[in-house]
Image (spheres, rainbow, N blue to C red):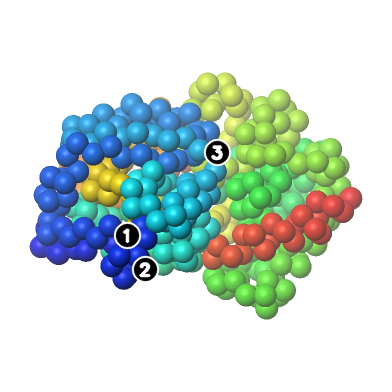
């Protein structure tokens, strides 16, 4: 199906000759492979995840080399660094950009779309896209921004709470219950300070809870809907603040700092948008062996992350080869192994043959993390990206400065 298509890769902007645009026509993925042979792909990605780094260096890169592509990981502290590099190079008229592929989602993808910085309409040519569910809402929209063939899915994530079962024998089962537990157990709960990614997600979950459920809050952001739903969440966060760790006088800077508090026994409930990593954290004794996942009755927010190709990438064919390879059952299964990275796959199991399915059936079960099906029960998708900075700033002004 993909081989029959004729695809023009270009900037989303459209007019030939614009800065940063490198039109390339491919009639089949075989043409892409031929063009990619010998190319070096610079993958810009967050460098703070040791398992993710090891997966790319030790598993994905060798597989890319077998396809004739050198994959070079470029570690960054924030995905915005990659987006800003792309935007600055396009503005300077560079058609040989230093960024070939970006691990991206959310506001960073939206920023790139608005600036017409991503190549679009190329993912249908990837053979392994046929193994995904094209109707999956997590793959169709990225924090409310239509994907429209401008990025290829890489893995899924589910916001998850976890707790120390040695300290809590009867854990709460709703977000409202977690806040009530925090008030009843002063000093034993906190969350990362926004704009840390995990802290920002927690704010959105509180807003959805105080609104009466995810279905009550519109996906798209507007000042009107913000004024309708944000105040109750901010009230709830102000109310619980005095009962937080250190009386809400300070907050952990990020998820890693929260994990340290949890491991040191200073708090009893923590949270993550990457629950699959809990398996390795417990096995390595970075978290106690009494760590248990806490699923909520109303579900939690989930999303997918993607691989995007900048409009002025130097080696777009090689980037397409890597994106297709990353979608293969072999790579998705390797990445899903808790001992490798533990990321949830984006493939539709109904589209896999018996041999491909066996790759996932043979994965070791985690003693800590339930299956994705259980974690994502009653899950809801992310709100539009514009909600994120609005809530973060309101929290900074109305909660963080109020004690």
Counting from the top left corner in percent of width and height, residue 26 is at: 15, 58
Q: Is residue 112 above or below residue 260?
A: below
Q: Is residue 228 visible?
A: yes
Label 3–label 1 contact, CB within 8 A: no
Question: Which of the two marks, 2 or 1, is nearer to us in this view?
Answer: 1
Q: Position of residue 118 (x, y in %)?
A: 38, 58
**Vertically, is 259 above or below 80?**
above
| Mark 2 to mark 3 CA distance (whole Å) | 28 Å
Residue 17, percent across and down? 30, 65
The disc, 2 or 3, on the residue closer to the chain's N-terminal end is: 2
- Per the rendering, the mark at residue 77 is 3
Residue 30 coordinates in the image, percent (x, y)? 11, 49
Circle 3 or circle 1, nearest the eye? 1
Q: Residues within 10 Å of mark 2 (few under 14, many from 20)?
A: some
The answer to which of 140 and 302 lies nearer the viewer is: 140
Q: Neighbour class for label 1 at 10 Å: few (<14), some, many (≥20)?
A: many
Q: Is residue 94 left or right of residue 194?
A: left
User: Cβ–Cβ below 8 Å for labels 2 and 1?
Assistant: yes
**Residue 367 visible (yes or no):** no
Of the numbered discs 3 and 1, the one sitting upstream in the chain is 1
Residue marked by disc 2: 13
- Circle 1 sits in a helix, a strand or a loop, which is it? loop
Q: Secondary structure at mark 3?
A: loop
> Badge 1 is on which residue?
21
Other residues around mark 3 within 10 Å, as few (<14) / some (14–19) / many (≥20)? few
Q: Secondary structure at mark 2?
A: loop
Q: Is residue 275 left or right of residue 327?
A: right
């Amino acid at each position: 199906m993909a081989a029959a298509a004729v695809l023009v890769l270009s900037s989303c902007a459209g007019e030939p000759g614009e800065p940063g645009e490198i039109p390339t026509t491919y009639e089949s993925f075989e043409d892409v492979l031929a063009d990619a042979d010998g190319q070096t792909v610079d993958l810009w990605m967050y460098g703070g995840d040791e398992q993710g780094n090891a997966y790319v260096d030790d598993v994905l890169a060798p597989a890319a080399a077998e396809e004739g592509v050198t994959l070079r990981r470029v570690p960054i502290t924030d995905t915005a660094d990659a987006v800003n590099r792309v935007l600055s190079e396009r503005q300077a008229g560079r058609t040989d950009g230093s960024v070939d592929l970006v691990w991206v989602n959310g506001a960073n993808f939206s920023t790139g779309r608005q600036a017409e910085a991503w190549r679009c309409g190329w993912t249908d040519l990837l053979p392994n896209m046929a193994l995904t569910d094209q109707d999956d809402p997590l793959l169709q929209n990225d924090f409310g921004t239509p994907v429209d063939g401008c990025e290829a899915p890489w893995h899924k994530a589910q916001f998850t709470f976890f707790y120390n079962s040695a300290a809590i024998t009867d854990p709460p089962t709703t977000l409202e219950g977690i806040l009530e537990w925090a008030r009843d157990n002063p000093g034993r709960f906190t969350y990362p300070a926004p704009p840390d990614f995990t802290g920002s997600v927690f704010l959105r979950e509180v807003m959805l809870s105080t609104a009466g459920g995810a279905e009550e809050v519109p996906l798209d952001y507007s000042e009107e809907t913000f004024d309708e739903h944000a105040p109750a969440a901010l009230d709830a966060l102000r109310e619980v603040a005095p009962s937080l760790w250190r009386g809400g006088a300070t907050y952990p800077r990020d998820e890693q700092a929260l994990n340290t508090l949890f491991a040191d026994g200073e708090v009893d409930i923590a949270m993550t948008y990457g629950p699959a990593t809990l398996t390795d954290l417990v096995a390595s004794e970075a978290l106690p062996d009494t760590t248990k996942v806490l699923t909520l009755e109303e579900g939690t927010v989930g999303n997918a992350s993607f691989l995007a190709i900048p409009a002025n990438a130097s080696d777009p064919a090689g980037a397409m080869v890597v994106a297709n390879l990353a979608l293969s059952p072999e790579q998705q299964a390797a990445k899903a192994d808790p001992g490798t990275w533990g990321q949830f796959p984006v493939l539709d199991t109904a589209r896999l043959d018996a041999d491909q399915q066996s790759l996932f059936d043979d994965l070791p079960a985690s003693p800590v993390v339930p299956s994705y099906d259980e974690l994502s029960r009653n899950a809801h998708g992310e709100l539009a990206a514009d909600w994120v900075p609005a809530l973060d700033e309101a929290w900074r002004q109305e909660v963080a400065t109020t004690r």
